[in-house]
Amino acid sequence: MGVPGARDGDARDGTFDTPIAREALTAVQVRNIENEHWPSPPTTRVLTVANQKGGVGKTTTAVNLAVALAMHGLRVLVIDLDPQANASTALGIDHPVGTPSTYDVLLGERDLGEVIVPVAAARGLSCAPATIDLAGADLELSSLSGRERRLAGAVAAHLERDPSLDYVFIDCPPSLGLLTLNALVAAREVLIPIQCEYYALEGLAQLLGTVEMVRSYLNTALVVSTVLLTMYDSRTRLADQVAAEVRKHFGELVVASVIPRNVRVSEAPGYGQTVMTYDPGSRGALGYLQAARELAQRGRIGATVEQSVAGK
Ligand code: ADP
Ligand code: MG
């Protein structure tokens, strides 16, 4: 279709390796996926996007997967749990101090349903925004009862009222503090984005240890279900080495589609958008579209930490 004779891989083996040919190929692939139907999960999938490193693509992953799934008719909620509120920004939601937000939910002052707002990018997509107030939440929560179960309680109550939600993505701050802990207790799946860079695996043991602790004591349903390679730069051998290492450790949990480093992805939040609407024909958008499709089609697989590290 579109590019005569073009097949997956042609661009790589050189036959079609010109910028225009690559773009045309990407555009055709995007258009083909656009018309597909993606299945609803049997029950709501709640995924926490976590990695205590900053800048690895947590927020970008949460919002782009959410938009991609919603564009395919699924009902998706993004819960922003980072005081920086980057997910809220990328979804075009204004969030000055005083905006009803996840901060009010954690403190028990509002139900989740009272802070959720619709997102213009796609029908069926909504967001519980964050505000900078969350920056003090760690401290404020520490004296409250059930401090690590606050979000879990709010999410469970909301899903009882609105069981038709297909996906909930919780975007975490870059730390393993009380906010991330709340996210891990509220979810059934952990999605770990890993940047294809030096030191990519550093700190993962600590993250997996925290997940295991939560699973043992606070949330037995929790599994690491998904590992996504982000910001992949095909020009460096290092990226390939990191990808191979991650696949060795996490096996089938690693999504086959890798997200390329693509400047359109990083431009989009400046326009209050994700790359899915900002430049749907870009390689970044295609990467997230393919990753979202895989997530939807393979359903909830998962492993406990011991299994995931053994690559089983
Ligand atoms: P985190 O939430 O883990 O801190 P972000 O999702 O905010 O990470 O990403 C960090 C920075 O990298 C942001 O400026 C973002 O726009 C940019 N970025 C993320 N993914 C990509 C990508 N695939 N290509 C180019 N830039 C990206
Ligand atoms: Mg972030």
Image (cartoon, rainbow, N blue to C red):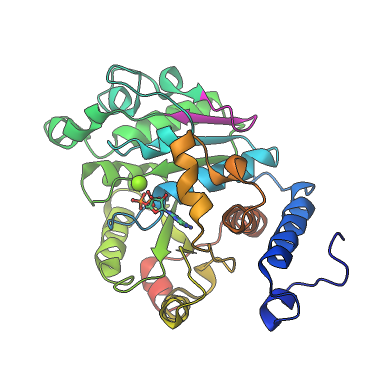
Is 17 left, or right, of 83 in this rendering? right
Identify the residue at horizontal 36%, vertical 32% (top origin). Answer: 153
Would residue 124 be counted in the magenta stretch? yes
Q: What quarter of the picture does the N terminus occupy? A: bottom right
| Left or right: residue 81 compared with residue 254 | left
Coordinates of residue 233 in the picture (x, y in percent)? 48, 70
Above or below residue 266? Residue 118 is: above
Q: Residue at x 44, y 32 (%)?
A: 156
Q: Please determine whether, in this image, residue 129 is positioned above or below residue 21.
A: above
Return the residue nearer the eye: 56 or 125: 56
Res 231 visible: yes
Q: Position of residue 26 (x, y in %)?
A: 70, 60
Across and down, in percent, residue 198 comes to 32, 74
Q: Work out whether residue 173 or residue 182 is closer to the camera in this orientation and state it.
A: 173
Check if residue 312 falls in the magenta segment: no
Magenta residues span 118-128
Asked whether, in this view, residue 27 is left or right of residue 309, the answer is right
Where on the picture, by quarter, is residue 21?
Answer: bottom right
Number of numbered discs on residues: 0
Q: Residue at x 51, y 68 (%)?
A: 254
Position of residue 76 in the picture relative to residue 29 (left or right): left
